[in-house]
Structure formats: structure tokens, C-alpha cells
């Protein structure tokens, strides 16, 4: 399988006052195209930091991150923003939808950065909402949707610009079991049927079972790799 | 334009706060429109009335200090003066104190100096013939439903008659019309005979407040003014002679100097507005830090976030400002329609609109700059984790 994400000697150090906190320590990692990877580990192990670095939300202190051949640690802020818009979809624990916008307008947000016309943007958003099973909720605002539905809108927003990589930070952390299963099933479908590479941070072993591979982090170091139940 | 719905959404996030802020902005720009209209009217007043061939002579000490009427024949004789007249100010009210009336007791030949006051020859002759005659402007006649032949009793404020009465009764013998729209405010004059006033008044006999002269050649106006003032040099009634426009400005400044007053009021209003809207924008952006972080996560560049926040503050100011100026136009229009040209208001014209909209943009950028910079520079990871 071709590698989509290549990480070599990745370290991340935060400086808080006079204190240096090494969150990630010389990580080497390869994620293949079409992988569905679960990142697990105890709190403070560096899962979210690693996810943020892979998604281009933060920059490493040391090391290389290449995504589809692009050395993203070398990109400046503006180039990194453009790169994220084109290549990565994000899903967060608390959905992070804009409360004043309808589901459709939330899904359209990444398309505002493209040259698509208003009609094309609406059509794309409707297709994405259809894919997550929420075509009939397009005009609803986030407050009018359940947690599971809001997370599916967030997933529609993540896939609307057809990125190759989805990064998901605890996507089921705020959901009941039934909604969590629906969301995870949706992510697995996007991985299997649409070829999306997914990197998901989770505390929940049942959620990790939906992934094809599980990576364990502890104290900033990658300690084990295992094939998931879904592999 | 494709980001406009994001700006609107941000503004409507806290409807009550946005509405109250909009009301404050609207009120500030309503004041701006109305007060600037008053200030402009005061500034324009002198220029509108002024004619280049007229000079006005008054006491160098103060407009309220009378001059001897005996100066008249000497002024008339100054080379270059083709005609002259004298005027006494008169104040009172008609029927009730609410109907204040400013009149002038004028010497013979006054109307010859003011050809813009159009009146039939028969009425001019009637005025010349009737000692208690009064000529009023069409606007004033319309306001009090006066017609020729009416007897008009006026209660004087200061000038009681020698018989102790404060009531002066005039016979309406002439109503003049002014064709030029810019002289609309001139149609509220009330002119009667100086001789009648001087003989009946208990005060100021044999004196006048100012002289008006017509010069044959306006290019000689300065030389003639100096010659007139030379007549009273080193006397106890030294004079100051000015062109009519300078005199009008001088006269208005005796009542009130509008520029600094309007400037001070608007300065205080806009200073408060800047503090208020700055606070609103700072709060609005602080509440939306996670949302702005999400936009950045999705790939919106820092400059895009800057533009969104600045757009929001400018739109807030522009909406409130435009509403305020529309309201000011309506208020000024209503006052002008109800009170005519007696209240010195100019319509809220394009110049005030341009200034107002320029101010909204300026204040919008000013109050949005800091929150916008904060939004532009926020670190996604910190903002999403609530730091």
C-alpha cells in the first residue's frame, strides 16, 4: 500500500514559562493511503498533538511530516492554510459547527475558499449531507439537531471538498453509544467505499475496533501497533 | 460578497446586543445629521443673504451699542455710496410668547436697497404713505394668515412706548416675495417705519442699530468702508463697516457660534460611540474565538479572518449610521415642512451623507482593528483547546 503520511523523527516541545514539556519524542510513523488508524493512549500521551501535526494545525519542534509527498512542516502559515483547505477534513469531539448557520451553510464553509459558484457550493453541500444521511436536515441549525446529527454534519463538512485525509479527534467522545456507532459506521464507510484515509484519536476501544490499525502512544512515544478488528 | 452571510451571522449571534448597539449608532448619526444641518445652515446664512454691492455699518464696540441717526446724511455723502438706509432692531411676540417676532424699524429708502424683496408698486406707495404701515414677508404672512389691511398688534419685549404701553399696532400694507430659493429664509421679515418707532418708543430716540449702504462699484467696497468708518474715527461712536456677508456672519456669531458647540457635542457623542462599539466588538470576537479557530482550521487565511471581523464592525457602523442619517433626513424634512425657513436647517444633503458614511467606515475600522488583529493571530490549537 502506498504511504500517505510519512513521519520521521518527529518531536514536539511546548515551553510554558521556564518549563520545557516534551509532548512527542522522536516519532517515526507511516500511514498508508486508505488506512483507518486509531490513535490510542492515556491522557497526556500526545495523541491530539500528533493528530494536530498530521493535520497541519501545529508545527513540530523537530522532524519531518510528509503528506502525499508534501513536506508540510516546511510550509508557512498561509501555505499551510491553503494545504489544509485542499487536502484535510477535520472532525472534532464537540462538532464545532457555527451555531448561526444552517447545516447546509456549515457544510458549505470549506467551499467558500474555492472558485465554485453559489449554486455549485449548495449542490456539493447537499450531496455531502445526503452521504451522511441528513439531506432532510439541510435547513436546520445545529441547535435543532441531536449530537449525533451534528457530528454527521461535521463529517459532511469534512468531506465536502473531497480531501484525501480525515483527522478526527475523539469524534464519538460526546455521543451516546447508539449515535457513536452510527458515526463510526459512517467513518468506516467513507474509508472503505470512498477511499478516505482516516486518523482518529479515541479513548474508546470499541471505537478503535472500527479502525484497520491501532497505534498506542505513551508519554510521547509510539509503543505499539496493532491491526484493528476491522482490518 | 460570498462571505456576507458569515458577517451577518456573526452580527445576529446576540440579537439584543446588536440591536442596542445599532440604536446607539443610529442615535449618534441622527445627532450628527441634524446638528451638521444646523451648523451648515448657520454657515450658509450669511452667504445666502449677502449681496456684493451692500455694506453694513455698526458700532465698533458692539452691535447692541446704538449709533446716532445724524450719521446718515454724512454716510450718504461719502463718494461711492449710491444709497443708504438705517435700521433699528425690534423684538416682541404676536398674540402669545410662543409666536416670537423679530422685526426691524427701517428708514425711508430701505426697500430700494433690497430689490430681491419683490412687492407691487401700490404696496410700496402704501408703505411710504402710512406711518403705522408694516411690510412682511410672504412666509410670515402665511404662517399667521395675515392679509393686506389687517391690524397687527405686537407685544414688545424691550421697547415700551412713551405712553407706557408695550403693544405696538401696525397696519399691514405690503407683502413681499423672494424668488430665489436660497433666500427662502428672507421671507419672514417684518419691516415698519423707523420714524414711527423713534417717535413712539420710550428708549433709544434718535439712534439706530446699523446702516446699510449700496455702493456703485463693488470693487471699491473696501475703500468706501474705510471712508465711512473715518467719519466717526476718534469719536464716542466709532463704527465698523463690513461687506454684508461678513456682517451676517458677525450677527449670527452674536447669538451663537455654532461650530465649536456642534463640534463639542459630536465629539462627546462619537467618543462614547467608539468606546461602546469597541466594547461590543471585543466581546463579540472573544465569544467567537472557537468559531474563528474553526474557520482557520478549515483553511481560512489570517487575512480572511481579519477581513471578516473588520467587515462585521464596518457593517454594524454602516447599518446604524445609514439608519441614523435617514432618520436625520426625515426629522430635518419634517421640521422644515412644519416651521418653514424660520428654523435654520439645511436639508441633509450629499455632503453630510458622504461625511457620515466616511465616519462610519473610519470608526468601523478603528473599533474593529484590535479584535480583528486578535482573530487573525490566534493559534488554532490554543483556541480550540480553550487557552
Image (cartoon, coloured by chain):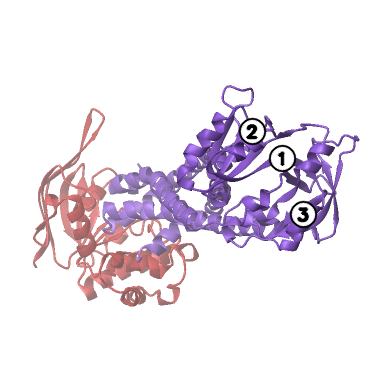
Which of the chains bears the disc numbered 2?
B
Out of A156 and B378, give the one closest to the viewer: B378
Which of the chains bears the disc numbered 3?
B
Residue topped by disc 2: B63
Q: On the picture, is B164 further left or further right than A12?
A: right
The C terminus of chain B lies in quadrant: top left
Q: Where A162 sits versus B236, above or below?
A: below
Residue at 8 percent of width and 66 percent of height: A2
Write down the colour of chain B: purple
Q: Are tags 2 and 3 found on a single chain? A: yes
Residue topped by disc 3: B127
Q: Secondary structure at mark 1?
A: strand
Q: Where B239 sits versus B305, above or below?
A: above
Q: Nearer the viewer, mark 2 or mark 3?
A: 3
Out of A30 and A13, give the one closest to the viewer: A13
Q: Residues within 10 Å of mark 3 (few under 14, many from 20)?
A: many
Residue at 75 percent of width and 42 percent of height: B194
Q: On the picture, is A77 further left or further right than B305?
A: left
Measure the alpha-carbon separation of dots 2 and 1: 10 Å
Q: Is residue B342 visible?
A: yes
Q: Nearer the viewer, mark 3 or mark 1?
A: 3
Q: If you read the primary sequence from the N terminus, does the residue marked by circle 2 or circle 1 appear first?
A: 2
Query: Can you tell which mark lies on residue B89?
Result: 1
Residue at 87 percent of width and 34 percent of height: B162
Write down the colour of chain A: red
Residue at 71 percent of width and 62 percent of height: B121
Q: On the picture, is B204 further left or further right than A146?
A: right
Q: Residues within 10 Å of mark 2 (few under 14, many from 20)?
A: some
Q: Secondary structure at mark 3?
A: helix
Q: Secondary structure at mark 2?
A: loop
Q: If you read the primary sequence from the N terminus, does the residue marked by circle 2 or circle 3 appear first?
A: 2
Please provide percent x and percent y for residue B177.
67, 61
Amino acid at each position: 500500500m502506498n504511504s500517505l503520511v510519512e513521519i520521521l523523527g518527529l518531536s514536539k516541545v511546548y515551553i510554558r514559562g521556564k518549563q520545557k514539556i516534551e509532548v512527542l519524542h522522536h516519532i517515526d510513523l507511516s500511514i498508508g493511503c486508505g488506512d483507518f488508524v486509531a490513535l490510542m493512549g492515556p491522557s497526556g500521551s500526545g495523541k491530539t498533538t500528533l493528530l494536530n501535526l498530521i493535520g497541519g494545525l501545529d508545527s513540530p519542534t523537530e522532524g519531518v511530516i510528509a503528506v502525499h509527498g508534501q513536506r508540510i512542516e516546511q510550509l508557512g502559515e498561509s501555505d499551510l492554510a491553503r494545504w489544509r483547505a485542499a487536502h484535510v477534513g477535520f472532525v472534532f469531539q464537540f462538532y464545532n459547527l457555527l451555531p448561526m448557520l444552517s447545516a447546509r451553510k456549515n457544510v458549505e464553509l470549506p467551499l467558500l475558499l474555492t472558485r465554485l459558484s453559489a449554486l455549485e457550493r449548495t449542490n456539493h453541500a447537499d450531496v455531502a449531507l445526503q452521504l451522511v444521511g441528513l439531506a432532510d436536515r439541510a435547513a436546520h441549525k445545529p441547535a435543532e439537531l441531536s449530537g449525533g446529527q451534528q457530528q454527521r454534519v461535521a463529517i459532511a463538512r469534512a468531506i465536502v471538498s473531497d480531501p484525501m485525509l480525515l483527522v478526527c479527534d475523539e469524534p464519538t467522545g460526546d455521543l451516546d453509544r447508539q449515535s457513536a456507532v452510527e458515526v463510526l459506521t459512517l467513518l468506516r464507510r467513507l474509508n472503505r467505499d470512498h477511499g478516505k484515509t482516516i486518523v482518529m484519536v479515541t479513548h474508546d476501544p470499541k471505537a478503535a475496533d472500527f479502525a484497520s490499525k491501532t497505534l498506542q502512544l505513551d508519554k510521547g512515544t509510539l509503543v505499539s501497533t496493532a491491526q484493528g478488528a476491522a482490518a | 460578497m460570498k462571505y456576507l452571510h458569515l458577517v451577518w451571522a456573526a452580527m445576529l449571534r446576540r440579537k439584543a446586543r446588536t440591536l442596542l448597539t445599532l440604536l446607539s449608532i443610529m442615535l449618534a448619526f441622527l445627532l450628527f445629521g441634524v446638528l451638521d444641518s444646523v451648523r451648515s445652515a448657520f454657515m450658509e446664512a450669511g452667504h445666502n443673504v449677502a449681496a456684493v454691492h451692500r455694506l453694513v455699518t455698526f458700532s465698533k464696540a458692539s452691535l447692541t451699542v446704538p449709533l446716532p441717526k445724524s450719521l446718515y446724511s454724512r454716510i450718504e455723502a461719502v463718494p461711492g455710496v449710491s444709497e443708504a438706509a438705517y435700521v433699528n432692531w425690534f423684538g416682541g411676540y404676536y398674540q402669545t410668547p410662543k409666536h416670537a417676532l423679530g422685526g426691524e424699524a427701517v428708514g425711508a429708502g430701505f426697500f430700494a436697497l433690497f430689490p430681491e424683496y419683490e412687492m407691487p408698486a401700490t404696496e410700496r406707495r402704501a408703505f411710504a404713505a402710512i406711518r403705522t404701515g408694516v411690510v412682511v414677508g410672504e412666509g410670515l404672512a402665511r404662517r399667521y394668515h395675515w392679509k393686506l389691511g389687517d391690524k397687527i398688534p405686537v407685544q414688545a419685549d424691550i421697547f415700551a412706548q412713551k405712553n407706557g404701553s408695550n403693544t405696538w399696532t401696525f397696519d399691514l400694507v405690503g407683502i413681499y416675495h423672494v424668488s430665489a430659493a436660497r433666500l427662502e429664509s428672507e421671507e419672514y421679515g417684518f419691516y415698519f417705519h423707523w420714524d414711527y418707532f423713534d417717535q413712539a418708543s420710550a428708549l433709544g430716540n434718535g439712534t439706530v442699530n446699523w446702516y446699510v449702504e449700496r455702493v456703485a462699484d463693488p470693487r471699491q467696497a473696501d475703500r468706501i468702508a474705510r471712508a465711512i468708518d473715518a467719519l466717526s474715527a476718534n469719536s464716542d461712536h466709532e463704527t465698523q463697516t463690513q461687506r454684508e456677508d461678513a456682517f451676517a456672519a458677525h450677527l449670527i456669531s452674536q447669538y451663537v457660534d455654532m461650530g465649536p458647540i456642534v463640534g463639542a457635542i459630536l465629539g462627546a457623542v462619537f467618543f462614547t460611540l467608539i468606546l461602546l462599539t469597541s466594547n461590543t466588538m471585543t466581546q463579540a470576537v472573544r465569544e467567537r474565538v472557537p468559531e474563528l479557530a474553526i474557520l482557520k482550521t478549515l483553511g481560512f487565511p489570517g487575512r480572511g479572518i481579519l477581513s471578516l471581523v473588520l467587515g462585521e464592525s464596518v457593517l454594524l457602523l454602516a447599518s446604524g449610521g445609514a439608519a441614523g442619517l435617514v432618520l436625520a433626513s426625515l426629522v430635518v424634512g419634517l421640521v422644515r415642512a412644519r416651521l418653514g425657513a424660520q428654523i435654520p436647517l439645511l436639508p441633509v444633503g450629499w455632503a453630510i451623507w458622504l461625511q457620515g458614511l466616511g465616519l462610519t467606515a473610519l470608526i468601523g475600522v478603528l473599533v474593529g482593528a484590535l479584535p480583528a488583529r486578535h482573530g487573525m493571530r490566534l493559534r488554532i490549537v490554543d483556541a480550540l483547546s480553550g487557552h
